[in-house]
Image (cartoon, rainbow, N blue to C red):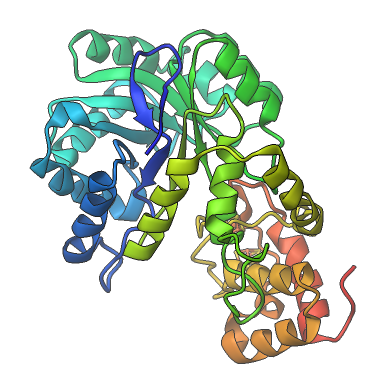
Amino acid sequence: MQHRYFGSTGVSVSILGYGAMRLPTRTGGKVDLDRAVPLLRQGIDLGINYIDSAHSYIRGTSEVAVGVAIKSYERESLYLATKIQIGSSYASDAKSWLRKLNESLRRLDTPYIDFIYFHDFHWREFQDYVAGRGKILEAARRVQAQGLVRHLCFSSHDSVTNVIKLIDTGEFDGLLLQYNYLDRHNTPAIARAAEKGMGVAIMGPLAGGRLVRREVGGSGKDHVPGVKAAQLGLRFVWSNPYVSVALSGMNDLDQIEENAAAADQAEMSDAELAQVQPLVEQSKSLADLYCTGCGYCMPCSNGVDIPGNFEIYNQGRMFDQLDRARQAYDASIAEEARASACIQCRECEEKCPQNIRISEWMPRVHAVLGEGQPYP
Ligand code: SF4
Ligand code: SF4
């Protein structure tokens, strides 16, 4: 497992981080500790020392699983990152942020958090709640001085211009951005952060698994013969020298082993990058409907399976398998959950970190998959 410094923090992190967002769950949606803890420990045993959770992941139980898993290890040998969302419905002032921080410390069962992130952070939230009237920044500096948190960071899906504004405040030691061979729009922000001495963590190195799950119905073929798709996605990310750690939301042992093996090799050679080029070109067709399958938009109050519809549409388009996509739409999505059930209420749209105009896409998806029209 290769390591890189997390900016100028002096912390040497494994280039593969464990994303604790997709851990196995039980009926009811809480984490399944019996399955999740061994997975996390397997990752740590294979050399991962950076674990990323969030106050909101898996109804707060992701942090609990991480807390249980790390008990078998020296606390100082691991770096824990967690995130607290800022906003009027979340933490909007010092008091509410501190309450959530204390909950995270309790769930993680740890005396300190290495990297505390403002979760899905926007420039306007920095102005209003963090630096402005909410005074969260003052509170964060106080708990940092007390040793409860070590580094202040943010994750963001805001525009590159606004992310760069956040970087340029000089208030943060690191950031977490989306980046993969399908979506490189954050490249300038990544470079700017590195230039300013910030650590760079990457989410979505496999576009929420879309760069791994291939073809409608999943034949299991690799994109490039002989190269595992997941390894290819991760190694593409590590080929950016400004990246400190790439997070992968792993939920089975084989996946952890595959990704850890990729982290032994890290960046790609020029020849390997050239091999990936055709795939990058092929994948461009997915860029205008960039659904990562995160599920933040769910549940739809009208029962539409938003990520399910988008996945079938995208996979059919990417692999030129329209017939199979139509069959899958018919067979694997219940009629009441199909795109045609969308009533354009738009309730889901503000929850989508990718800013997808879901209500506008649903009729297009149904036209192609349900009414026999060609892909636009
Ligand atoms: S816009 Fe459509 S998909 Fe979104 S919540 Fe409303 S009915 Fe559901
Ligand atoms: S539509 Fe947006 S929120 Fe919903 S699964 Fe896709 S990316 Fe996530």
Q: Is residue 104 depicted above or below 325 in this figure? A: above
Q: Is residue 314 depicted above or below 148 in this figure? A: below
In the displayed structure image, the side of residue 307 where residue 71 appears, left or right: left
Q: Position of residue 24 (x, y in %)?
A: 30, 64
Q: State the residue at coordinates (40%, 60%).
A: 255
In the displayed structure image, the side of residue 350 where residue 358 appears, left or right: right
Q: Is residue 369 depicted above or below 299 in this figure? A: below
Q: Is residue 166 visible?
A: no
Look at the image and tell me in which quarter the C terminus lies.
Answer: bottom right
Q: Is residue 226 depicted above or below 185 in this figure? A: below
Viewer-nearest residue: 263 or 88: 263
Q: Position of residue 84 (x, y in %)?
A: 36, 34
Look at the image and tell me in which quarter the N terminus lies.
Answer: top left
Tell which quarter ligand 2 is in: bottom right
Viewer-nearest residue: 149 or 283: 283
Q: State the residue at coordinates (29%, 41%).
A: 47
In the displayed structure image, the side of residue 231 where residue 371 appears, left or right: right
Q: Quadrant of residue 13?
A: top left
Q: State the residue at coordinates (32%, 33%).
A: 81
Q: Total label count?
A: 0
Q: Quadrant of residue 193?
A: top right
Viewer-nearest residue: 12 or 68: 12
Q: Position of residue 135 (x, y in %)?
A: 38, 13
Q: Is residue 150 visible?
A: yes
Q: Position of residue 322 (x, y in %)?
A: 79, 81
Q: State the residue at coordinates (67%, 47%).
A: 355
In the displayed structure image, the side of residue 327 where residue 102 appears, left or right: left
